[in-house]
Amino acid sequence: MSLLSVQRQGSGRLLVWLHGFTQTRDSAHLFRSILAGSHELVTLDLPGHGLSSSLSATLEQTADLIAEALKEDKFDLAGYSLGARTALHLALRHPHRVSRLALIGASRGLGDEAAQLARRQSDNELANHIERVGTSTFLQEWLARPMFERLPNDPLELANRSMSSALGLANSLRQAGTGTQRWLGDQLPELTMPVLAMAGALDTKFVLEANAIAHAVVDGHVELVPDAGHAAHLEQPQAAAELIEVFLAH
């Protein structure tokens, strides 16, 4: 029996969507509803989040858990931020399962050992902070960060955040934060499926990452979501979903 429970909506070509940090499988409801109009959309809670809050797993382990949870041999795969990094690991570890890969706000990791160590320390400090203050206070602090200043006021979106376990979110950072991620830049040429690397046009750091990822893979494509920052699929759900739909249709 799989440790991850799968949720399905819509019909059509299978698309697996992986959420970001502090989110759940029910997050991005507007964005998901658009994709579910033309796909069978599969979502699940990543370790440390939602119904999987008691699970703790590395990015590699999470990739294998997702592969185990899906009964289909082949599927399209997409993800945002933490979900995009997880999707990259899944595509690299199980390339025969992934037909097409779409990424929003993905990171190859940190290529410098000192930068990795500094980020791990930062993530550990933040994880400890989450356990001290609890999920409600932390989420207020997290969403007040400049990278999320363009998020729309959406009570349903806020309600679908992962609030049940401070330890779960803390362990997600400790086990699957950017600081723990090994550098993937050298492995990206192994990906032969079509890859769409997306970023909000205003998200300068991840625009650079999107271009680097697209140029490293065999069949890479870059799309920028206009008038959007890091959480492009929440800020501009229609535009982000349409870019993915066009990519998956070819």
Image (cartoon, helix red, strand yellow):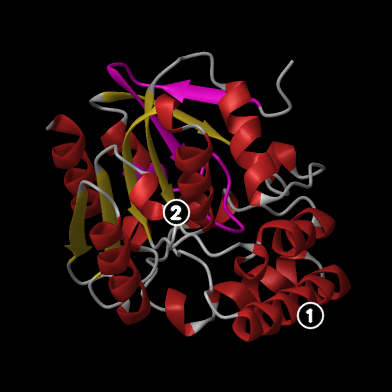
Amino acid of disc 1:
Glu
Give the percent coordinates (x, y) of residue 112: 56, 80
Determine which quarter of the picture holds residue 54: top right
* Res. 187 mark: 2
Name the residue located 50 percent from the left edge and 54 percent from the top edge. Answer: 85
Q: Disc 1 designates what residue?
A: 125
Q: Residues within 10 Å of mark 1 (few under 14, many from 20)?
A: some
Is residue 30 in view from this perspective?
A: no
* Res. 183 mark: none
Amino acid of disc 2:
Gln
Identify the residue at the far right of this view: 132
Q: Is residue 134 magenta?
A: no
Mark 1, secondary structure of its residue: helix
Q: CA distance from mark 2 to mark 1?
A: 29 Å
Name the residue located 73 percent from the left edge and 73 percent from the top edge. Answer: 137
Front residue of 160 and 112: 112
Q: Is residue 28 magenta?
A: yes
* Mark positioned earlier in the residue sequence (2 or 1): 1
Is residue 65 in view from this perspective?
A: yes
Where 76 falls versus 101 (above or below)? above
* Magenta stretch bounds: 5-31
Q: Quadrant of the C terminus?
A: top left
